[in-house]
Amino acid sequence: MHAMTRPAPLSLQQVLLCGAMVVTLSMGVRHGFGLWLQPITMERGWSRETFAFALAVQNLAWGIAGPIAGGLADRFGAFRVLIAGALLYAAGLVTMALASTGTAFTGAAGLLVGIAQSGCTYAVIYGVIGRNVSAERRTWAMGVAAAAGSFGQFLMVPVESALISEFGWQTALYILGAMVLVIVPLAFGLREPDRTGVAGLGSQSIGAAVREAFAYPSFRLLMAGYFVCGFQVVFIGVHMPSYLRDRGLDPQVATMSLALIGLFNVIGTYAAGEIGQRWPKRYLLSAIYLLRSLAIVLFLWLPLTPMSVYVFSAVIGLLWLSTVPPTNAMVAQIFGVQYLSMLGGFVFLSHQIGSFMGVWLGGKLFDATGSYDVVWWIAVALGIFAGLINLPVRETPIVRAAPAAA
Amino acid sequence: MHAPTHSRRRRWMRALMWVAVALLLAAVFMAYRNPHRVVELANRVWACF
């Protein structure tokens, strides 16, 4: 029996358009969840801790479910996982609106939305990009998709704030639930042809792929670097307004900071894809982490004024999600695209553990010391660490032993 | 003769696309600066912490 010929890939325009719209929605909708803290806790009579706990569970569930959703997407097709993710997302948003106890809210906003996120964000979309876009344009394409996710975050904060004001917090959640269902038709645009039995597309088992990745030092270095990314970004994102308030700055400064981070994040993420296509990605990642540390040092060292906050926000925005395209493109470059979504999910799990540590340590050390200084300096040290450990990453494809002839 | 015209059209299309992206980003940025929204948004962001 002859091996089947390789099926035609999806077109670049189709993959980018559908993939970008999916991540714009999936990344954007959850980004404004903090805006619900005040109305929900007031109406339900919950503490802030109840709300914060649900969002912490969401981040961890997103990370833990990531490799599973990625593995399912690699095995059964990304479009099926995307549809399941969209349905879970909508169910999570509606249940958030209806939840009358803290436990139910944690189940909805934490577990349902967290698992849904793992099914319709970068790792799953990047698997489709990896399998359908040539290596010559892959990092750039990942940059476009990541920039779309960044744009979603930038766009949805004012949109969600307006929805809460116009329709009330509960109806706003129903509207978002309807919005994420748009992912379902978009998923059909990412439906790939069946590749089972196609020659040259790899026959590695999932277990072998996981063992191979974890035994490979460069994969572990990428995971360690991504941990730092999560720590820094989420620490700054969550604790920055509080830091500014403690230093006596106006609330509008925090809003402007949020807007600048969002705007420059779109530009930086796209640029990272463009640069990563031309330069060695390990150097790009190293530069991003070292520049983050430099930006934080200058921010702490210079007098704190609205202008210094704006400049810092613009610079850190440029470096915000710019690690996403080169990190995932390197995973594809080293291990190939057969299990790209699953391996991307493992790397992202490390990111989410870092995110959790950034939020938790930020609060813990603030309570212990009365300031954020220690955590800021931990973020600086981690940035230098990540900058250095990315340098020895081997970007070349892993060499696999040829299967023995029968 | 056709090739230069085609490549010029592509350059124009690309420039137009970048202008559209810049306008979209500027429009969203202005939404953060909308005087009706900025205080309300600032209060909500502040309330998170």
Image (spheres, rainbow, N blue to C red):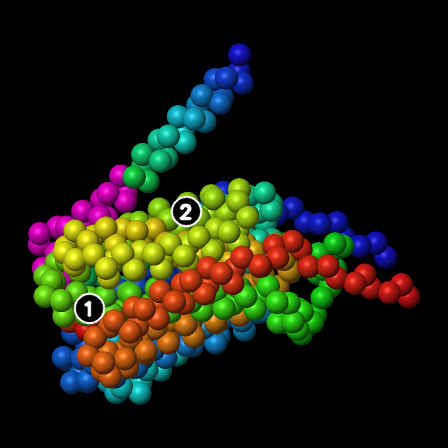
Name the N-terminal-most of marks 1 and 2: 1
Residue type at numbered disc 1:
Tyr
The residue closer to the viewer here, A9 or A303, is A303
Q: Position of residue A251 (x, y in %)?
A: 12, 62
Task: Give whichever of A330, B39 is nearer the camera.
Answer: A330
- The relative height of residue A55 versus residue A340 in the rendered view (above or below) is below
- Classify residue A158 by image quadrant: bottom left
Q: Is residue A216 visible?
A: yes
Residue drawn 54% across and 66% down?
A: A221
Residue A322 rendering spot, x and y as whole percentages: 41, 54
Q: Residue shown at 14%/56% (left/top)?
A: A305
Q: Is residue A147 left or right of residue A130?
A: left
> Left or right: A84 with respect to A297?
right
**Percent x, y of residue A253:** 14, 58
Instruction: Please state which of residues A388 and A82 is positioned toward the viewer in this rendering.
Output: A388
Label annotation for residue A243: 1
Q: Quadrant of the C terminus of chain B?
A: bottom left
- Crowding at mark 2 (Cα within 10 Å: few <14, some 14-19, many 20+): many
Q: Point out the stretch of residues depicted in magenta.
A: B23-46
Q: Position of residue A153 (x, y in %)?
A: 31, 58
When the figure is inspected, residue A301 is found, relative to residue A51, above or below; the finding is above
Main secondary structure of the magenta stretch? helix
Q: Secondary structure at mark 1?
A: helix
Which amino acid is tagged 2?
A: Tyr
Discs 1 and 2 lie in a common subunit: yes
Answer whether residue A261 is magenta in the image. no
Where residue B22 sits, quadrant-wise, is: top left
Count of all numbered marks drawn on residues in the image:
2
In the rendered structure, the answer to whether residue A336 lies left or right of residue A354 reads right
**Residue that label 2 marks:** A270
Give the side of residue A232 with respect to residue A131, left or right. Answer: left
